[in-house]
Image (cartoon, rainbow, N blue to C red):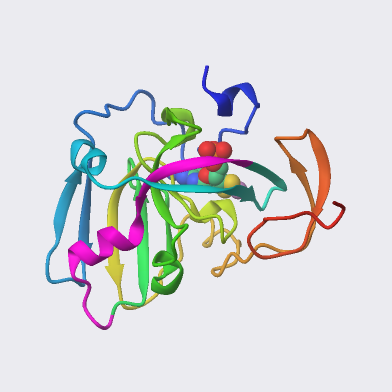
Amino acid sequence: MTKLHKMDTPVFWAEGHPGRLQRDTWKISISGLCLNPFDITWKDLLKMPVDTVNARLTSVTRWSVYGQWSGVRVSRILEMAKADKEVNFVRFWSVGQIYDTSISLEVANLDKTILAYAFDDEYLDEDYGGPVRVFCPYLWGYKSAKSIVKIELMKDYRKGYWERRGYTDHAEIEEGEIFDINSGRVRRIPGGEVKDFLDE
Ligand SMILES: Nc1nc2c(c(=O)[nH]1)N[C@H]1C(S)=C(S)[C@@H](COP(=O)(O)O)O[C@H]1N2
Ligand SMILES: [Mo]
């Protein structure tokens, strides 16, 4: 059992659980408005410098989990793709390509926005978006698409799975109460990336 399981972190698969996925043959295609579209494999990702982020995944359904996420910064991938000047949004597609979500290029390029493959030094399993998922602590969790197979560079915004169903396009984390998985307590968050609690 991984740490995320032990802490009883919710497992969200709105489109249905994908079942077993193979790390060794995992491949993410980077396409859209760029000079150098390419595929990146699990092995390629592991050869890149490791970017480690100590931060929280916080769901609009009012829970938040803290830990050490590691992987590769999305900005490194965008640099390799040589994005065109007109790119404004980055769209992430999950396995099966039913679930997608997009973030602004600006947020995609922030340091803590990563393609994550591990949590607290354990590889992510399928429940939590392995082999590779987006981890973006700045925004509500629905922007952190799991089990990524495709990254698309776009000029114009497209609503994703949850945005079409009414969640905001910007996904800014709002002040209010959340259940903190790490402490097992309900706590108040200030809004924006969750770093501290208001009741500390
Ligand atoms: N493919 C896919 N990615 C997804 C989701 C989903 O339903 N399917 N749910 C999102 C939401 S709403 C949240 S809060 C987080 C939850 O991550 P977890 O299931 O690993 O806890 O994943 C996000 N990524
Ligand atoms: Mo969520």
**Residue depicted at x 27% and y 83%:** 86
Viewer-closest of 48 and 173: 48
Q: Is residue 140 left or right of residue 156?
A: right
Vertical order, 86 against 81 (above or below) = below
Q: Nearer the viewer, residue 139 or 67?
A: 67
Magenta stretch bounds: 66-86
Asked whether residue 189 is drawn in magenta, I would say no
Q: Position of residue 29 (x, y in %)?
A: 21, 51
Residue 76 located left or right of residue 169: left
Seen at 55% across and 55% down, the residue is 137
Residue 60 position, x and y percent, is: 66, 53
Q: Position of residue 55 (x, y in %)?
A: 58, 49
- Residue 30, how many percent across, how many down? 22, 57
Q: Is residue 144 visible?
A: yes
Magenta stretch holds residue 82: yes
For residue 14, say whether it is visible.
Answer: no
